[in-house]
Amino acid sequence: MPKNLQRLDPFLSQMFLVEIDGIVVAGFSDVSGLQAETEFEEIREGGVNDFVYKLPKGTKYQNLTLKKGLTTSSALWDWHRKVVAGKIERRTVHISLQSTKAKGHMDWDYNNQYQVLDAFPVKWSGPELKSDGNSVAVETLELAHHGIKKGR
């Protein structure tokens, strides 16, 4: 596991750390969209009434949604702004589940880390703006991607 994934003080309440290009850029409280679905086509054979052939067509992945985020960096915002400007930069994103004891981290399967492949931001939702801190909050960040891979 990478040694640079440590419980950073601003992220203590965010259980999921997001790493891009080897750098932890944010912490999030909720991660959803870890879903893969293989589409199929049904074909019936004439005279055969007890089953239908199901032929796989391809697999699609739901967008990954990161919610209730906190960051001390503008990296995610800058990445999203490039997409808005038409400069798509696909990146591999690592997301690690943090230990509740503020020491080290655990992965979703407790042995290997998952990578979100060829991801890029497709939706950004900001928080209410308040003047009670230096950190920048991210309410929701949605990433399109080409799949999820186990390990580094």
Image (cartoon, grey):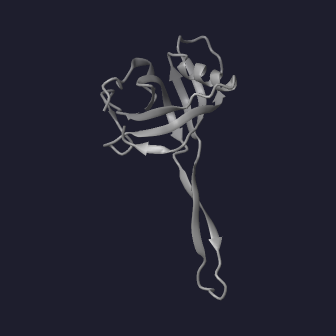
Q: How many marks?
A: 0
Using the image as rendered, state which of residue 143 and residue 55 is in the foreground: 55
Residue positioned 58% across, 23% down in the render: 79
* Spot occupied by residue 99 in the image (x, y as percentages of width and height): 34, 33
Left or right of 138 in this view: 17: left
Please indicate, yes or no, whether residue 101 appears anywhere in the rendered image. yes
Q: Quadrant of the N terminus?
A: top left
* Quarter of the view holding residue 12: top left
* Up-down relation of residue 143 to residue 50 (above or below): above
Give the quarter of the figure containing the C terminus.
top left
Give the image location of residue 51, x and y in percent: 59, 81
Q: Is residue 127 visible?
A: no
Coordinates of residue 66 in the picture (x, y in percent):
55, 34
Q: Nearer the viewer, residue 110 or 30?
A: 110
In this orientation, which residue lies closer to the viewer: 91 or 124? Answer: 91
Q: Residue at x 51, y 16 (%)?
A: 73
Residue farthest toward the right in the current orientation of the protein: 85
> Residue sitting at 50 percent across and 30 percent down?
28
Q: How far across and how far down the image is residue 114, in percent?
A: 41, 41
Q: Is residue 136 left or right of residue 109?
A: right
Q: In the rendered image of this protein, does residue 44 appear above or below residue 126?
A: below
Query: Is 42 above or below relative to 114?
Result: below
> Which picture quadrant has residue 146?
top right
